[in-house]
Image (cartoon, grey):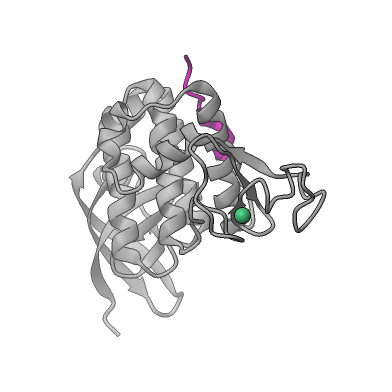
Amino acid sequence: MRRSFTRTALILRSRPQGESNREVWFLTCEEGILRATVFGGPKSRLRAHASPFHSGTLWLYHDPVRDSRKVTDFDVASWRPGIRELYERTMAAGAAAETVLASHGGGGNWKEAFGLACRSFDAFETAQAEICERIFIHFLWNWAALLGGRPGLACSSCACEPADHGILWYDGNEGSFFCPRCAGLDGTGGTEDGKAGGLLPLGPGGRRWLSAVEDLDPARLGRYSADAASRKEIRSVVTAVMEGLLGKRPATWDEVQHESG
Ligand SMILES: [Zn+2]
């Protein structure tokens, strides 16, 4: 086995390790998540390069005896310094990075995962404060698709198209949407009466927004707004979808600032 190798990598997280080293987590195009040690004190050039949200070419050395990896060089192609210049950007990008780690890098579609993460971080880099939540929610919605668990925006039971002004209900236990009739919420006593507890509504505004941004480059999200009530529904539903896929809810999600106005 070769001891030195290169990877195309994006840095997700960096933590102190011992007195002067850092433990760094990468998302790589070639094999998903990798963890490696960066040696050197606070003034080392390598340590400055190996900081969160940078991406580029990574040189690693693998010690087969200890089964440990160390970073020997990192040639940064995208620095994204703007993310650290605004609190909202930092929190939203951090929450996206923790989501990538919590889902083990995207479940096998490494290249696609790397592209989606990089595009989202590029968007955070220059985003106005109030757009950061939008980019984060868009990231979660597309990350759910990458993991193969994004529910379709239609009733999963009768496959009816929701009426223009109709509401879809998201059932976290099923990981699916239901129309009011199938959710037992139209007063006719649907298939499973009393299902209402724990269902999350998604009205026409939220449905339109989620459909419109599905394949959108996140850098263009500034032009896609939703009203305050729809935004609240979208965030509840999208975080519930991803929570179902991860089996947990990273605490960093709640640190993402709500869009005001
Ligand atoms: Zn239905």
Furthest toward the top, the residue is 261
> Measured along the vertical axis of the image, is residue 19 above or below residue 111?
above
How far across and down, in percent of the image, does residue 158 sit? 59, 60
How far across and down, in percent of the image, does residue 114 sit? 31, 57
In the image, residue 34 lies in the stretch drawn in magenta: no
Q: Residue at x 40, y 57 (%)?
A: 37
Main SS, magenta residues: loop
Q: Count the marks: how many? A: 0
Furthest toward the front, the residue is 188
Q: Nearer the viewer, residue 33 or 60?
A: 33
Relative horizontal placement of residue 89, taking residue 159 as reference (left or right)? left
Q: Which residues are magenta?
A: 252-261
Q: Give the quadrant of the N terminus.
A: bottom left
Residue 191 visible here: yes
Relative horizontal placement of residue 229, taking residue 56 as reference (left or right)? right
Q: Nearer the viewer, residue 146 or 176?
A: 176
Residue 52 visible here: no
Q: Nearer the viewer, residue 194 or 141?
A: 194
Q: Residue at x 55, y 35 (%)?
A: 203
Report which quarter residue 119 is drawn in: top left
Q: Residue at x 44, y 75 (%)?
A: 67
